[in-house]
Image (cartoon, grey):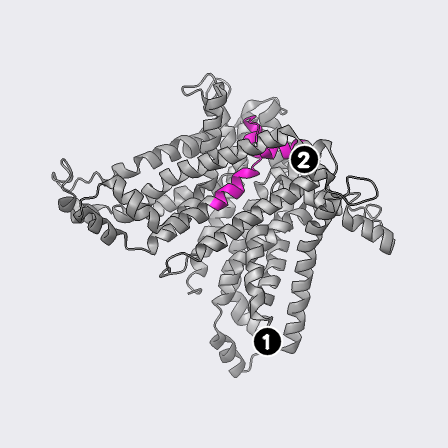
């Protein structure tokens, strides 16, 4: 057992070394813009760049739209499947896992070919249309996480009883969903939402190929042209990812207890 | 399937025109918006690619596009993509397993477990463009590690043939999200290992090595192989990290496809479809293996 423990410490130390080095390296590199002294100059350059502000704002709006549409699409569907169509669950699981199977670059390739200006639904013909297309692309990317989070949340509550109770008090479907079901799965929805935010904010492939001014392509462009600013961006991006995960941890403390553990 | 649900709720809902005639249920109407969304933005775009890879320019059926994939430059792209994915998945599985083992079974203090898992959750989502920047700042020509090795130890890793913009460099970078992903998947499997199994084995006279070879590994095998398949698909489809790291200097399949979509570098649109179709086939097989093995491994992990 003693030998075991020594090996454990060695493995853990090696792991910490591998994961800490790039983070320290990035942080150190991002502070080196001014010759000979550590400074926050790279951060001021990045934060003061109007293109940073525009693309970041664009990606934040995109992430919020994705979350809203994703929730409106996933919560009623997952609820309905649990309540009325239990036999459909394997099929829904298959559909919601597809985005993990088909690489995003292939999906967006399909968009470009299917919704080009000469097609029956020329979404890529206008900026607004392309924005909508990109947003639906992000909903697709977030689908596996969102659906699973909500479905796990629904498993923890008695959907049928809650629905019948609400109906016997005269509630309609909209009321049931918004005032009974949604508050009960709020924690799951929030977890899915934060994960979606982390995914969308730095997404590169879809935005680049649909030529939208998003944060991911901006980071790539800056990386191709500058030395120290990209490191500052990487630190900012890591802080955002860390923030999203921390929020998931915080909200999941308020989750109702799940009868079976999800995998 | 929908029979019992439809009958049980039909009378209570008292919705007109519902479920009176035979056992017709209109419950499926509730998922129509979702199905429409999945059809328009997931299924049809993919079908377009799949069908397009079997079509000539004027729409006739052909296998020529698929056959054209077997030219040296494209085969080389698939080969290096598959090698990077296999290498990063194998090493990711190995090191991830060792870390998970150290935390769950290795006798480390219990308070370490939660921070390790939380960090794994963060790091497995820290991919894409910023990850490339982080590794450039660390292992690039002026990176922290490169400079420390050069100035303190007199080792010039670039002089020794290391290059971040290569097979080895990309594999090293991908491990940053592959290892944490393994930790997240394998930890529950290790949690499921019962103490009694180890005790039973040692009562029968097994050594530690025999216990792992004859009991633990056979049980964990499906989880490990499944994780491997998932990691493989994960790195095979990744574009952003590789593109931000290497530009287009390293010709892996996703980067080739990226250039093809942007500017038709292959000068044959339908070859582009076939290239994408090849990616679906490879990741599809990997994910099928993953799902199949996961259902097998869940028999043990309760």
What's the chain of the residue with tag 1?
B
Q: State the image coordinates of residue B13 (x, y, percent, origin top left).
A: 16, 43
* Vertical position of residue A257 compared to residue B57: above or below: below
Judged by its main secondary structure, the magenta piece is helix
The nearer-to-camera label among 1 and 2 is 2
| Picture residue at 73% right of the left edge, 39% below the top | A41
> What is the number of the mark on residue A46?
2
Picture coordinates of residue B147, whole percent (x, y): 82, 49
The residue identified by callout 1 is: B208
- Along the viewing direction, whichever of A206 and A34 lies nearer the viewer: A34
The answer to if B278 sits in the magenta stretch is no
* Mark 1: secondary structure: helix
Q: Quadrant of the C terminus of chain A?
A: bottom left
Chain part drawn in magenta: A194-221
Closer to us: B3 or A147: A147
Q: Is residue B225 visible?
A: yes
Residues at marks 1 and 2, CA–CA distance in whole angstroms:
55 Å
- Subunit of label 2: A
Element under disc 2: helix
């Amino acid at each position: 057992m003693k030998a075991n423990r020594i090996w454990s410490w060695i493995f853990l130390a090696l792991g910490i070394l591998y994961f800490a080095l790039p983070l320290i390296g990035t942080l150190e590199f991002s502070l080196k813009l001014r010759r000979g002294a550590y400074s926050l100059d790279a951060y001021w350059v990045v934060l003061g760049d109007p293109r940073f502000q525009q693309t970041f704002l664009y990606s934040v709006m995109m992430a919020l739209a994705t979350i809203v549409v994703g929730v409106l699409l996933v919560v009623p569907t997952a609820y309905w499947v649990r309540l009325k169509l239990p036999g459909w669950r394997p099929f829904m699981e298959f559909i919601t896992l597809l985005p993990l199977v088909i690489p995003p670059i292939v999906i967006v390739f399909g968009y470009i070919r299917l919704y080009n200006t000469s097609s029956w639904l020329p979404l890529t013909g206008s900026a607004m249309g392309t924005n909508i297309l990109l947003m639906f692309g992000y909903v697709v990317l977030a689908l596996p996480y969102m659906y699973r989070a909500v479905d796990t949340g629904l498993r923890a509550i008695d959907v049928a009883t809650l629905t019948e109770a609400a109906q016997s008090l005269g509630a309609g479907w909209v009321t049931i969903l918004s005032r009974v079901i949604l508050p009960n799965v709020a924690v799951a929805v929030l977890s899915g939402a934060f994960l979606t935010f982390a995914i969308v904010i730095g997404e590169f492939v879809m935005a680049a190929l649909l030529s939208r001014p998003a944060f991911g392509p901006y980071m790539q462009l800056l990386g191709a042209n500058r030395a120290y600013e990209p490191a500052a961006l990487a630190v900012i991006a890591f802080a955002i990812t860390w923030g999203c995960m921390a929020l998931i941890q915080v909200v999941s403390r308020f989750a109702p207890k799940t009868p079976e553990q999800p995998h | 399937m929908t029979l019992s649900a439809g009958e049980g709720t039909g009378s209570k809902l008292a919705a007109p025109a519902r479920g009176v005639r035979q056992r017709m249920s209109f419950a499926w109407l509730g998922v129509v918006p979702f199905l429409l969304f999945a059809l328009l933005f997931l299924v049809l775009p993919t079908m377009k690619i799949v069908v397009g890879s079997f079509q000539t320019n004027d729409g006739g059926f052909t296998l020529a596009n698929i056959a054209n994939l077997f030219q040296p430059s494209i085969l080389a792209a698939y080969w290096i993509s598959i090698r990077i994915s296999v290498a990063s998945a194998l090493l990711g599985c190995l090191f991830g397993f060792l870390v998970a083992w150290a935390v769950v079974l290795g006798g480390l203090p219990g308070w370490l477990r939660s921070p390790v898992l939380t960090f794994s959750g963060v790091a497995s989502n820290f991919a894409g463009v910023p990850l490339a920047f982080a590794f450039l700042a660390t292992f690039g020509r002026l990176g922290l590690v490169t400079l420390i090795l050069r100035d303190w130890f007199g080792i010039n890793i670039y002089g020794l043939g290391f290059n971040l913009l290569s097979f080895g460099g990309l594999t090293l970078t991908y491990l940053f999200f592959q290892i944490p992903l393994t930790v997240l998947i394998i930890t529950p499997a290790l949690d499921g290992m019962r103490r009694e199994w180890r005790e039973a084995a040692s009562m029968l006279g097994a050594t530690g090595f025999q216990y792992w070879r004859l009991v633990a590994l056979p049980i964990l095998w499906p989880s490990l192989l499944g994780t491997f398949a998932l990691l493989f698909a994960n790195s095979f489809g990744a574009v952003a990290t590789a593109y931000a790291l290497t530009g287009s200097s390293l010709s892996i399949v996703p980067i080739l496809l990226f250039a093809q979509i942007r500017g038709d570098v292959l000068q044959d649109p339908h070859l582009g479809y076939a290239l994408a179709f090849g990616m679906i086939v490879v990741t599809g097989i990997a994910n099928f293996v993953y799902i199949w093995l996961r259902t097998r491994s869940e028999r043990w992990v309760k």
